[in-house]
Image (cartoon, rainbow, N blue to C red):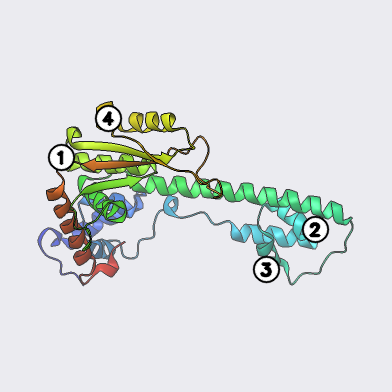
Amino acid sequence: MTEITGKYADFEGLRERAIALRREGLSRRQIRDRLFIHNNDILNRLLEGEPPPEWTKRPNAKDDLRERARELRLQGLTYDQIQLELGCSKGSISLWVRDLPKPERQRTREEASAIARRGWEVTMRRREEERRRTKEAATGEIGTLSDRELFLLGVGLYWAEGAKAKPHRPQERVDFINSDPHMIQVYLAWLRLLGVSADRLRFHVAIHDSANVAAAERFWAELTGAAPSAFGKTTLKKHNPRTNRKNVGEDYRGCLLVRVQQGADLYRRIEGWWYGIVLSAHQPGQSNRT
């Protein structure tokens, strides 16, 4: 357990403020940023016994759906009809009503199939709405990134997707390639945070020769805002017609390679930063981090 010293010495006063903010409806992250508490063990102890605000909880309507499903089953509706009415899966319905009597079949097989198809469509719409709500709620949880948060995020991003020196290829080169425009934007924001000037960046598009190469080049140029002189020759990958490629259509723009010139020193720092993260993550007390 973390010893309470220094700026956390007035623990009871700090706890009163933390509880007051919690009861105003603030999340853990918001309280942390408001009170400048960067130790999760301390934050856990300050908020001990205080339930989270309702807006941070994921909605759960399973109990209401279960009761309504049982009512409909007692009225003689089939699984397909209940699915069409409630939009939940037949697997869930089966668990909820399996102890109730089975209604007699009153329709043809074709009619039953049509009801089943409509029920599945309703289920898919409901699931898509759940996905949308979950993603929107998760987006709101992030808020504004601090410089330190962006810094650590960028280190992890580079170590996952960037070029790394190998025993058989000891090049200390800062190369990052990806097809996700959002990932490229985050990476470029990280480089700006590190003070890497735009004149040190070079870009190369890599794309299948069967795609719209000119449109892809325009897309990446607009996304990065880089001058045409910053783009090198596009790498064309020969398309094999016997393969069933999934990355086709208007949204396929290939990959963008971002290279930092004279980046050997930066590469060494990135490698050092990454191993600093690894060492910190293995220190005692990390299990309390949320």
Characterize the local packing of mark 1: few (<14), some (14-19) or many (20 or more) Cα atoms within 10 angstroms: few
The numbered mark, 2 or 3, whose residue comes first in the sequence reads 2
Q: Label 3 is placed on what type of residue? A: Leu
Nearer mark to the viewer, of 1 and 4: 4
Q: Residue 32's spot in the image, x, y percent?
A: 25, 53
* Quarter-of-image position of residue 237: top left
Residue 77's label in the rendered image is 2
Q: Label 2 is placed on what type of residue? A: Leu
Left or right position of 62 against 17? right
The numbered mark, 4 or 3, whose residue comes first in the sequence reads 3
**Mark 1 residue element:** loop
Residue 226's label in the rendered image is 4
Characterize the local packing of mark 2: few (<14), some (14-19) or many (20 or more) Cα atoms within 10 angstroms: some
* Label 3 sits on residue: 95
Q: Can the viewer see residue 14 in this picture? A: yes
The numbered mark, 1 or 4, whose residue comes first in the sequence reads 1
Looking at the picture, tell me which residue is in the foreground, 187 or 233.
233
**Mark 2 residue element:** loop
Question: What's the distance in space between the residues labelled 1 and 4, CA to CA?
Answer: 16 Å
The numbered mark, 4 or 2, whose residue comes first in the sequence reads 2
Question: What's the distance in space between the residues labelled 4 and 2, CA to CA?
Answer: 62 Å
Left or right position of 210 against 22? right
Is there CB contact under 8 Å for labels 3 and 1? no
**Which residue is at 30% across, 49% downward?**
30
Residue 170's label in the rendered image is none
Nearer mark to the viewer, of 1 and 2: 1
Left or right position of 188 against 80? left
Q: Residue 283's spot in the image, x, y percent?
A: 20, 70
